[in-house]
Amino acid sequence: MRADLKDIAAGLLLIAAALFFGLIGFAQLPLGTSFRMGPGYFPALLSGLLGVMGLVIAGRAIGASAAVFVGRVPWRGIVLTSGATVGFALLVPRYGLVPALVVAVLLSAFASQRMTLMLALGLTAGLTAFCVLLFRYGLGVPIPLLGAS
Amino acid sequence: MDLLGHLLLGLQVAISPNNLLFCFIGALLGTLVGVLPGIGPAATVALLLPITFTMAPETSLIMLAGIYYGAQYGGSTTAILINLPGEASSAVTAIDGYQMARQGRAGAALGIAAIGSFIAGSVATLVIAWFAEPMTTVALKFGPAEYFSLILLGLVASIALAHGSVLKALAMIVFGMLLGLVGTDVNSGQLRYTFGVGELADGLGIVAIAVGVFGVAEIFRNLEDEQEREIGVKTVSGLMPSAADLRASAAPIARGTVIGSVLGVLPGGGALLASFASYAVEKKLAKDPSRFGKGAIEGVAGPESANNAGAQTSFIPMLTLGLPANAVMALMVGAMTIQGIAPGPSVITDKPELFWGLIVSMWLGNLMLVLLNLPLIGIWVRLLSVPYYILFPGIIAFSAIGVYSVASNVFDLYTLAAFGLVGYLFVKLGFELTPLLLGFVLGPMMETYLRRAMVLSRGDPAYLITQPLSAALLAATAGLLCLLLLPSVTRKRSEVFIEED
């Protein structure tokens, strides 16, 4: 049977989100009445709507001609770039702005396949210096350069 | 106070050295990100939000608006020089502008684009000043039911120009609204969807979400296919269009200005629609339509004027009703809220200096763009050749510092990383991300208005359609939805957007 896998995945993703918000809301948040709407009323309305939309999108995809599913995914770039942000998050409160920036820029530099080691080192030094000057001294962002905040 | 008095008040505010400086910085930064690949005005505005928290509200909005229209200028530059529209609305400019550049007339194309944009921007500024008061007078009569319906209409209208599936765009709005509900419920004080994470009590950070979906996810998208950008034009000379060029462009600029000013007011990013409409009109009116697509200067002058006029007048719904038409304006609404200003019709009466100062600054900013960008064009051309793999580590570093500086909160950084991934996943599955941000900003407002309306009606949902004004707005929403989901319109929309891609 033919099906548009991309739209089926899209629909399922929406249904999952709807179930997540709907079920947790149902378990934790009182609905109230339409007169006195409780904290759970609007979330229930929205997750219901989202679920229906997910069903329609996935339903219409069955029998539809298949689209290109996902195409290329730059896995290396995604891992390194996300790693850069997480690395920054782990380092900045304990060791300060400079070490966090060095790690983040080095990691994200290698997300591109065109990057060379020398260029990455130069870029790291240059960008770190630039960010320190701009944010710390130019804009006065209160993040210590070295050491815990 | 009359119109002149208002504009004078605005001029006083806009011309103060501080505001003038930030207007300039905004316009310059906007042009820069319009020219550079991989970072757009939405991500830039989001990144600069934390810096603006300490500024006066009018200064902050003046700078953020500068980024928005500066990016339109920068987008036209790349459209003409390398056939890559930096912004969706300059896609039409690329058709004839790039052909002109290939014929060695890049200077004339850039010049006429700048002149047309400036004229259109000036007229549109007057249109905003004209429209603002009557609009707000109407809006001040709105009760909660009318507001609920109006936001609904605005949200549906905003996706009329979204690419691809209408249903998917609607789903993104709803998902964004759900994300907007995370945090403390203002009515009951109950925590929603926080899972015991203390940082979530104030809700998800708008900066982290916006930078994640418009900055980080965009990097992933660019890494899919790493190509050098080819620059056909290395040097640009003769920026002043000839007398014949000016004669040929005068009428298209005038028509483009009118089309743009009218279409821009519609909620939902009128600038894009306006440039398409202007191009179609010019082609139809031309004595020799076959010249279009081969470097006709009318095909640059008209759409460029239209998109700039539209970009300006699209501030009307945001400023008078608090209804953002696109991601940048959603972020500006967020900026106002953080500054403690409730966006909506009361802004013009409570904060006239902010309202009129912003409007006059937009005119000044357009003037600065003409005076500065034409001489600086050599620098922009050189920036076009900066390879992407050098740029994006910088984007990541700026994003991390910008998001962390909001509240020195590590949790915001994890939100940033997560929304980069979520944004990319959604893009891969054919979803647009702008509706998500609009839903995120407007969702909590809708809940508040719905609650108030239901209290007024003692819980009767029919109240929304027994109030005549609210009923009219809901009818318009329903009509628009039917129109959008109609098969023939669906086909027409996909044609338009194929042309654009």
Image: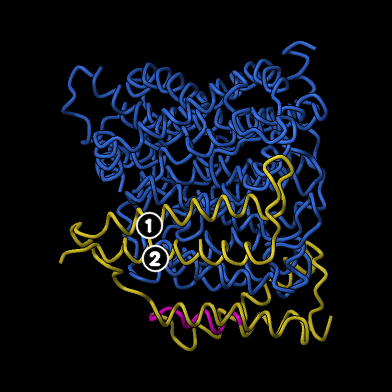
Q: Amino acid at mark 2?
A: Leu
Which x, y percent locates residue A77? 44, 78
Q: Chain of mark 2?
A: A
> What residue lies at 51% left-to-right and 83% top-to-bottom?
A120
Asked which quadrant contains residue B382, the reply is bottom left
Q: CA distance from mark 1 to mark 2?
A: 8 Å
Q: Main secondary structure of the magenta part?
A: helix
Identify the element where label 1 is drawn: helix
> What residue lies at 74% left-to-right and 43% top-to-bottom?
A36
Q: Chain of mark 1?
A: A
Magenta span: A104-113
Instruction: Tell me the blue chain.
Output: B
Q: Please rate how many residues cluster around mark 2, counting C-alpha atoms within 10 Å: few if below 14, some from 14 to 19, many from 20.
A: some
Q: Amino acid at mark 1?
A: Leu
Identify the element where label 2 is drawn: helix
Q: Please rate how many residues cluster around mark 1, counting C-alpha atoms within 10 Å: few if below 14, some from 14 to 19, many from 20.
A: some
